[in-house]
Amino acid sequence: METQKLSNGNSNYINIIMQQRQKPKEQKIPSKTIKEVSVAVAIGVSAVVIGGLLFKNKISPNILKLSETIDFKEATTLKEAIEYGTKKLGIKKYKGFEEKDLDVLNWINEGLTLCANKAKDKGQIVMPKKISYYTEQYFNNEGWQELAYIGPFGSLNISKNTISDFKNAAVKIINSYEGSQEAKNKLIETLNFKKAYRIFIAAANKTNKNTLSWNKGIFSTITHEMGHLQHKFNVRDFHFFQSLGTEQERPKKLAKGAEELLKLFDSKKDVAAKVSTYAKESPCEFVAEVYSQLAHGLTLDDDVMDLYQKLFGV
Ligand SMILES: [Zn+2]
């Protein structure tokens, strides 16, 4: 799809999707929402949820033991997709999915399978306990609707609204391709979320509207969130994990040892910049972005890997 010729009109579609989910200026956001859903950028990105009081250090991770490669096969029914996720990926619960969302669930399951297979040598991986397809509107501090975020109890939450925006934007982009309408209609008819994601990202990358986070990988949203999940449990102490967030996410009193790591991170912004613009936001986002790239099979520079390990990346 990336090779399709794109018309100049494409950047407008990127603008459309970036604007339409921006919170209205007059909208009052409950402070709880701001606290719970923190950083993110315009598209394809996520947040670390800060519900510190809820769980302190006491949440137990949902660990999936890995001994062999998991073969992913696209499910043809919702029941089949859920069965795959619960049996092969150790997901305890799927919530909010309907039959028509099968393509989205397949995309999520495939992304999770990619992460699991990458972790095979370690013999285990932390999986989301629950996968929730939600319709509530959560806006981050910058006023963007989240595509995905990790919830306080280790759930992976995906926004139905943002997914639908992606699909609509992809349709508009296809319609802007050069070529016969018949061919375009054919593309649109068979458009599933994975294809829509690829089309949208290809178009976004052709414009100057950078998405900030790394998104060359087709599962980058899922792998980024999985990066947060692994990091959170690798750090163990939630207070410490929180202390490695952005300034808005950090607790007033930083965890012991966190200050040194924040200083180290600040002195290595050039290293973080090699990963993505978003990776410079905070140690947490850096770790998630690196994890995301590693999951997609990229090899990263030694100084990146060195910083990743120092910040408790998995
Ligand atoms: Zn993130």
Image (cartoon, rainbow, N blue to C red):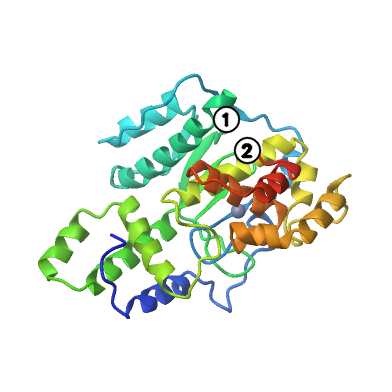
Residue flagged by tag 2: what amino acid is it? Gln
Residue 69, above or below 243: above
Q: Is residue 218 left or right of residue 263?
A: left
Q: Residue at x 13, y 70 (%)?
A: 181
Q: Position of residue 266 (x, y in %)?
A: 78, 60
Circles 1 and 2, Cβ within 8 Å, touching? The answer is yes
Measured Cα–Cα span from mark 1 to mark 2: 7 Å
Q: Could you say which is closer to the camera, residue 6 or residue 137? A: 6
Q: Position of residue 286 (x, y in %)?
A: 65, 53
**Tag 2 residue:** 230
Q: Work out whether residue 38 can be spotted.
A: no
Residue at disc 2, secondary structure: helix
Confirm or reject: label 2 Cβ below 8 Å from ligand 1. Answer: no
Q: Dot 1, how many residues are within 10 Å of its Cα: few (below 14), some (14-19), or many (20+)? A: many
Q: Which image quarter is the C terminus in?
A: top right
Q: Residue at x 73, y 57 (%)?
A: 249
Residue at disc 1, secondary structure: strand
Q: Work out whether residue 17 can be spotted.
A: yes
Residue flagged by tag 1: what amino acid is it? Ile
